[in-house]
Image (cartoon, helix red, strand yellow):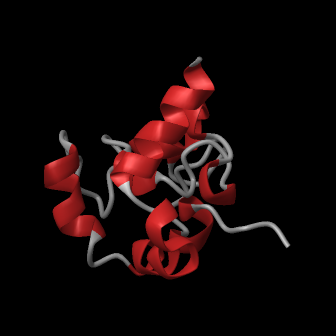
Amino acid sequence: MAKQNCWEFLKCGREPGGKNTDIYGVCSAATFTDADGFCGGKNGGRACVYITGTFCPELLTKTHTEKFKHCENCDFYKLLRIEHKEEMSVLAFDHYIRKKRK
């Protein structure tokens, strides 16, 4: 079974072709191809906590620190932490991206 991406779990409608893209645009997590495959997600769909500009929850954040204040209370992020433990860290994400870009 495929793992859910953030836009599927949260039903935000900001994935390409989603119901809210005309209003809010496509989410940066849905288009961040460098993260494709991270924790089994499509693009940044399971790495949303590490991608700025995701507009969750209807709040555009500019930095990871600013964003993380909201993410640590997010049910999707809590689920990812349970499922992936140490793999769900900013260091693991950075390593994944660097390895893919080589």
Say left or right for 63 vs 92. Answer: left
- Answer above or below: position of 98 versus 73: above
- Answer above or below: position of 82 versus 33: below
Residue 27 in view (yes/no)? no
Residue 101 image point, x, y percent: 57, 21
Q: Farthest residue to the right: give it.
A: 1
Identify the residue at image location x=45%, y=67%. Answer: 86
Identify the residue at image location x=38%, y=43%. Answer: 51
Residue 13 image point, x, y percent: 55, 57
Q: Farthest residue to the top: give it.
A: 102
- Answer above or below: position of 95 versus 65: above
- Residue 69 sits in quarter: bottom left
Quadrant (top left/top right/bottom left/bottom right) for the C terminus? top right
- Residue 30 sits in quarter: top right
Q: How many marks?
A: 0
Pick the residue in front: 55 or 78: 78
Residue 36 image point, x, y percent: 65, 41
Pick the residue in front: 14 or 69: 69
Identify the residue at image location x=68%, y=47%. Answer: 37
Residue 5 image point, x, y percent: 61, 61
Pick the residue in front: 6 or 25: 6
- Answer above or below: position of 98 versus 22: above
Residue 78 in view (yes/no)? yes
Quadrant (top left/top right/bottom left/bottom right) for the N terminus? bottom right
Identify the residue at image location x=55%, y=69%. Answer: 11
